[in-house]
Image (cartoon, rainbow, N blue to C red):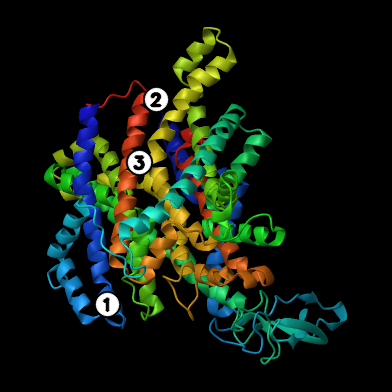
Amino acid sequence: MSDAAVSRQLSAVNVDRSESSFAAFWKMAGWPARVSLALLAAFALAALFAPAVAPYDPAAQNRRQPHHPPMRVHLAPPGEWSEGLLYVHKTKLADIRKRRYEETEERIRLSFFKRGRVLTTADPDARLFLLGTDALGRDFFSRLVYGGRISLSIGLVGVAISYTLGILIGAFSGYVGGRADFVIMRATEILMSLPTFYFLLTLAVIIPATLPSSLTYLLIVAILSFIGWAGLARIVRGLVLSEREREYVLAARAMGASGARVLVRHVVPSTFNYAVVSATLSIPGYILGESALSFLGLGIKDPDSSWGLLLAEAQNVEYLLRFQWLLIPGLLIFLTVMAFNFLGDALRDHMDPKRRGTV
Amino acid sequence: MGRYVLRRLVNAVPLIIGITFISFVVVDLAPGDFFTSLKMNPQISPETLQGMEAKYGFDKPLVVRFFLWFWRVLHLDLGESIFYHVDVLSLIGRFLPNTVILSAAAMVVSWGLAVPLGLFMALRPGTWADRLLSFFAFMGMSIPSFFFALLLLIFALQTGWFPTGGSFSPDYDTLSLAGKVWDRVHHLILPVVVLGTSGVAGLMRLMRGNVMEIMNADYVRTARAKGLPERVVVFKHILRNAINPFITIAGYELGALFGGAALVEAVLHLQGMGNLMLQAVLSQDLFLLMGSILIGAVLLIVGNLLADIALKFADPRIRYE
């Protein structure tokens, strides 16, 4: 092979490398995975910039406007655009007991990027309820945006913890073998035979009701991760058992690498492909775990916000029938979980083309 | 086979001790214990309290207390519920059947639908029917059970077609036998739909994957080459092999079903283990909690064992030494 041919081939390899794996993934993924990714990115941005996206503080109450229905946003006629592109109608409480509101003729102008908010009312004393209010008159949209911070991040943090634990413990167990392996495997068996949800409820008992929500959040993550690492550790152990017999491990040992170095630099990375896919697919479990606990009143507590907690108000049968915007947090959990499932599925096809179209 | 079952049962003992011990430690970590609530109850005299403290060893260290509890469990004494003031065993005996019936019904529904649907999809990969069912499977897998239960609750309240609370009607005792059976079934429909949906969705995809993998197997090609009718190839060669992984996961399914059932029971106010457990958690009812976890763990372990035994009968290639 001539030098020119070799360098051509090398540059071809370089071209392949320069195309990021994300671009390759995007090209291959079907529309469900693309839509999912876009949706999750939108949710994540809203949660990240919650103080700007949410028009109000999530705990700010408007006692005179309980269970206000979502407001309809109107487009102003072109002649009035200088005053504001959009407006809503001011409402007046007709019957507080029945929570009946009447729209008045008066218009509330909306403006963009005022007072550090993306969209809010031009008049600071007027109110904009895009998705209605709850029993205390708190803006539901703002509560949802802030709740997304907890509901979305809990999956990522939980997976990060349990996967670090699972991969390290599993790899250690498989690589070292012997008595340590025996003990670790028995421990995972115990964790995996736990009636998970019952145990989750039991663990929730140790969270005192008076604890601030930030600590409750950490405890929930810790609890979910404590249950979550076992299954992964067993799978990683299996992968490592087959991997450690491979020639490259022998080569590394022969070159004088220590056991720990071989483990961390060579054996553990070989399990990453599997771990990325399975992590994406297990994020929903954490999101659902937190929402279920908060929904049952054992997780995040008022006045803080999480999607599961917000949905809990819909358990009141009368509210459920009359104020159906209270179901939106459930819809958001549903969409998020579905997006992660689509994404995980596409990632699996991407990492392992052999499986494409089979599952 | 007998030796295998025996060994599994012997292995289950340390497993159960481990599970219950972890739970015992967790409950012990909780701030305040159930004696705090007992002490505040004016109906209970200090003497009774002292008697209980001595009986359950609450003045002793954690490990001693645990083995005192475990020793009584071996004698089928699960202690007394603080909230209900009844024997825990009889309480569980009253609530467990409802949950077991619900889970079993959901399992029957999800297997009954998932096997034919998965087979159907795998035989027509890429068609609009396959894509549509795949999409529904994703939806079914993703919808949170408590959210789905709320949606069905709205449906039931607005149409009035389904009862919306409890596991049976208030006038249950006055009904005839047929009426009683119908009453139970009527109350089961909504929770089974909720639980069954996620089950069908997951299993359907699994079935589709299994069948597609097996369709490429050598023995399927051989069967076709022999000139066997397609019906025989599909039902005898493909279906029987594709079902085996189902039996393996049946045991784990049981655990998922119990968890899912707990949430659905809470939303739809069914008298089952989930609601019982929730009540026990909220009132820090130690013995009820421990009893529920014990029963849950035993059911899971027995379920897994039964699944492995069933697999042996379904697949003669599997041998347990």
Q: Earlier in the sequence, mark 2 or mark 1?
A: 1
User: Does residue A347 appear left or right of residue A130 in this picture?
Assistant: left
| Percent x, y of residue B147 | 56, 60
Q: Are marks 2 and 1 on the same chain?
A: yes
The residue closer to the viewer here, B129 or B86, is B86
| Percent x, y of residue A205 | 33, 69
| Percent x, y of residue A315 | 56, 68
Residue A123 lies, with reference to residue A28, above or below; the image says below
Q: Are marks 3 and 1 on the same chain?
A: yes
Q: Which residue is mark 2?
A: B314
Residue at 46% across, 67% down: A296
Chain holding disc 3: B
| Percent x, y of residue A283 | 44, 56
Q: Earlier in the sequence, mark 3 or mark 1?
A: 1
Q: Name the amino acid, label 2.
A: Ala
Residue at 61% across, 54% down: A35
The residue closer to the viewer here, B136 or B146, is B146
Label annotation for residue B142: none
Q: Name the amino acid, label 1.
A: Gly
Chain holding disc 2: B
Q: Let me know if residue A194 appears in the view.
A: no
User: For residue B33, what is the image quadrant?
Assistant: bottom left
User: Does residue A120 appear left or right of residue B272 in this picture?
Assistant: right
Q: Of helix, strand and loop, which one carries label 2?
A: helix
Q: Of helix, strand and loop, which one carries label 1?
A: loop
Q: Which residue is mark 1?
A: B32
Q: Name the amino acid, label 3.
A: Gly
Q: Residues within 10 Å of mark 2 (few under 14, many from 20)?
A: some
User: For residue B55, what is the image quadrant?
Assistant: bottom left
The residue closer to the viewer here, A226 or A51, is A226
Q: Quadrant of the N terminus of chain A?
A: top left
Q: Which residue is mark 3?
A: B303
